[in-house]
Image (cartoon, grey):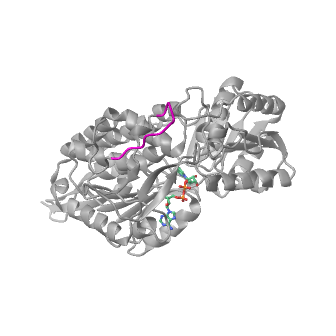
């Protein structure tokens, strides 16, 4: 086993399959290229069995100050002097570095989240690497605005716009897709020449820290990428977002947290990019490819145990196929296999924590109390004794509640959905739009004209037709209404991570 700088102690566990020797037992902050202990630690528990898997060093104000200072210094150091092409080469090397240590990232992500390795192997870790490659390509190919401007003396002027980094970016991350969503911000931020102070979720500290090792290995200058661990209020999250040395804040998480962060960003009039909650509808017309709609909907409801911001917690099914669709979804849901991440048969892991399970279960109880028909699930599954300490939950489907119930209006963020029938196109568009959120929607139909008509009227940042979670990283990503502010992805990320400067030259 290779020694890891500053992190020599590994967990040796009795679990046979997930190679927990690969995960860190002590997780330190990564500041100015060094792993920093603080003496104040909190426990990270496995969602699979409730056991403590790591101790995390919580950053205080002093560590956040040091991280911001390192990031500011790096802007003026060798990092700030690199050409775009040189920066891009380093980011390709980061992507390669993630791929070289793929199994370690995989073990760390699955240990923290409990998600199936089959999922993380195909989505989380490859996307973590891709986020560096794609944005390195984007910045290398960004066009420059250029105008020839007439002047009274007839000699004219040239106007051209150049992009400059915005400075130190505070990156506040959630726990559901930790590496994927963190690198979705760090990739473009670094590609544009900024430096970052990342605050991963307290639930998922491993992969952000591991990435620090990769940054050192491939020669990213110290201070460019910093990680501080801790919680939100009166902890690392608040210290980063209120720090005057942070020039911009990009956030992914709950809408209520986003509101707090937006207020913090108001001090100093700093820009924010907010990717927040959703209550996404799925619309299934009777003329759809039934099997494709069923397969896509199974993923959109249950993937990652329902902990996907783009997931479908409201399903509208056209009346002629309503009963058949409910029955088919129930049958498929009951075939899902809950299990350990490393079991190749596992479709569904646990929720992230007992705290989150309490929240999801409160909606399960609420649905029953409101008179929902519980088509399947609705509680805690029986698990073998060795997994009884985990935060397992049953995949759940309801019918029989209306659009104004909290089950149809509030984000639950669990493996559950409410299915309702509809009768016509205008009706379903109105019902789908009757929400505070506007992140995503899936439409299933073979009628292409209708697909375009409906997609055009849905109030959401992303609309999929006959698919779900089909992503091209060059496209704009973000939410309408309370689901977000701003768009990231491809060249759209440049709008947030750079300042445009116009230079006017009189000839
Ligand atoms: P959360 O808002 O509880 O936490 C997100 C991050 O914010 C964590 O790192 C947390 O420590 C930090 N934080 C909390 N309070 C803070 C404060 N006062 N100041 C600074 N930082 C603070 O969200 P979560 O539970 O980790 O993630 C789940 C949520 O994320 C869901 O609502 C989901 O829809 C949303 N999400 C949205 C997207 C998207 O792209 N729109 C993607 C993934 C998740």
Membership of 129 in magenta stretch: no
Q: Does 372 appear above or below 296?
A: below
Membership of 11 in magenta stretch: yes
Q: Residue furthest bottom?
A: 267
| Residue under the image location 54 percent in, 67 percent down | 259
Residue 266 at what x, y percent from top left? 44, 73
Query: Which residues are the magenta region?
Result: 9-18
**Side of 31 where 237 appears, left or right:** right
* Residue 403 visible at all: no
- Please tell me whether the stretch drawn in magenta is mainly helix, strand or loop: loop
Q: Nearer the viewer, residue 60 or 305?
A: 60
Residue 38 at what x, y percent from top left? 35, 64
Q: Does 91 appear above or below 369?
A: above
Residue 381 at what x, y percent from top left? 72, 40
| Residue under the image location 44 percent in, 38 percent down | 20
| Residue under the image location 54 percent in, 39 percent down | 115
**Quarter residue 126 falls in:** top left
**Quarter residue 277 falls in:** bottom right
* Residue 10 visible at all: yes
**Quarter residue 333 falls in:** top right
Q: Nearer the viewer, residue 69 or 40?
A: 40
Q: Does 355 appear above or below 375?
A: below
Q: Nearer the viewer, residue 168 or 102?
A: 102
The quarter of the rendered structure image containing the N terminus is top left
How many discs appear? 0
Residue 278 at what x, y percent from top left? 61, 52
Q: Residue furthest right?
A: 371
The quarter of the rendered structure image containing the C terminus is bottom left
**Side of 146 where 23 appears, left or right:** right
């Amino acid at each position: 086993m290779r020694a890891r700088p500053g992190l020599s102690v590994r967990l040796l566990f009795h679990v046979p399959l997930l190679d927990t020797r690969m995960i860190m037992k002590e997780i330190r902050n990564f500041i100015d290229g060094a792993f920093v202990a603080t003496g104040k630690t909190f426990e990270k528990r496995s969602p699979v069995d409730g056991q403590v898997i790591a101790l995390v060093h919580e950053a205080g104000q002093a560590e956040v100050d040091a991280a911001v200072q390192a990031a500011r210094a790096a802007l003026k150091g060798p990092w700030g002097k690199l050409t775009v092409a040189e920066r891009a080469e380093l980011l390709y090397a980061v992507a390669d570095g993630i791929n070289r240590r793929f199994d370690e990232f995989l073990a760390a992500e699955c240990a923290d989240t409990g998600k199936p390795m089959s999922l993380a192997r195909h989505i989380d870790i490859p996307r973590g690497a891709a986020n560096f490659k794609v944005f390195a390509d984007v910045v290398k190919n960004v066009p420059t605005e250029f105008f020839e401007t007439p002047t009274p003396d007839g000699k004219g002027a040239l106007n051209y716009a150049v992009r400059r980094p915005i400075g130190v970016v505070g990156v506040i991350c959630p726990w559901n897709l930790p590496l994927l969503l963190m690198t979705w911000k760090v990739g473009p931020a670094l590609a544009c020449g900024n430096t970052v102070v990342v605050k991963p979720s307290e639930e998922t500290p491993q992969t952000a820290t591991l990435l620090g090792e990769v940054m050192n290995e491939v020669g990213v200058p110290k201070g460019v990428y910093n990680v501080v661990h801790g919680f939100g209020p009166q902890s690392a999250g608040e210290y980063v977002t209120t720090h005057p040395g942070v020039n911009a804040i990009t956030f992914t998480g709950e809408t209520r947290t986003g509101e707090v962060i937006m207020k913090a960003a108001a001090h100093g009039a700093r820009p924010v990019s907010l990717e927040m909650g959703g209550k996404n509808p799925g619309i299934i017309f009777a003329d759809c490819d039934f099997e494709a709609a069923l397969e896509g909907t199974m993923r959109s409801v249950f993937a990652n145990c329902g902990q996907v911001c783009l997931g479908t917690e409201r399903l509208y099914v056209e009346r002629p196929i309503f009963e058949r669709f409910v029955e088919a979804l129930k049958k498929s849901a009951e075939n899902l296999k809950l299990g350990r991440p490393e079991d190749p048969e596992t479709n569904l892991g646990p929720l992230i924590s007992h705290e989150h399970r309490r929240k999801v279960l409160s909606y399960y109880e609420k649905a029953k109390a409101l008179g929902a028909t519980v088509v399947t699930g609705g509680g805690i599954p029986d698990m073998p004794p060795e997994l009884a300490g985990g935060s397992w939950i049953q995949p759940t489907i309801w019918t029989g509640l209306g659009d104004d119930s909290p089950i149809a209006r509030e984000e639950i963020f669990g493996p559950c959905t409410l299915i309702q029938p509809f009768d016509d196109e205008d009706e379903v568009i109105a019902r789908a739009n009757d929400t505070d959120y506007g992140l995503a929607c899936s439409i299933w139909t073979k009628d292409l004209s209708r697909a375009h008509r409906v997609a055009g009227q849905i109030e959401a940042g992303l609309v999929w037709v006959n698919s779900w979670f089909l992503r091209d990283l060059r496209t704009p990503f973000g939410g309408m209404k309370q689901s977000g502010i701003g768009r990231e992805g491809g060249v759209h990320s440049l709008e947030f991570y750079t300042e445009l400067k116009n230079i006017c030259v009189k000839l």
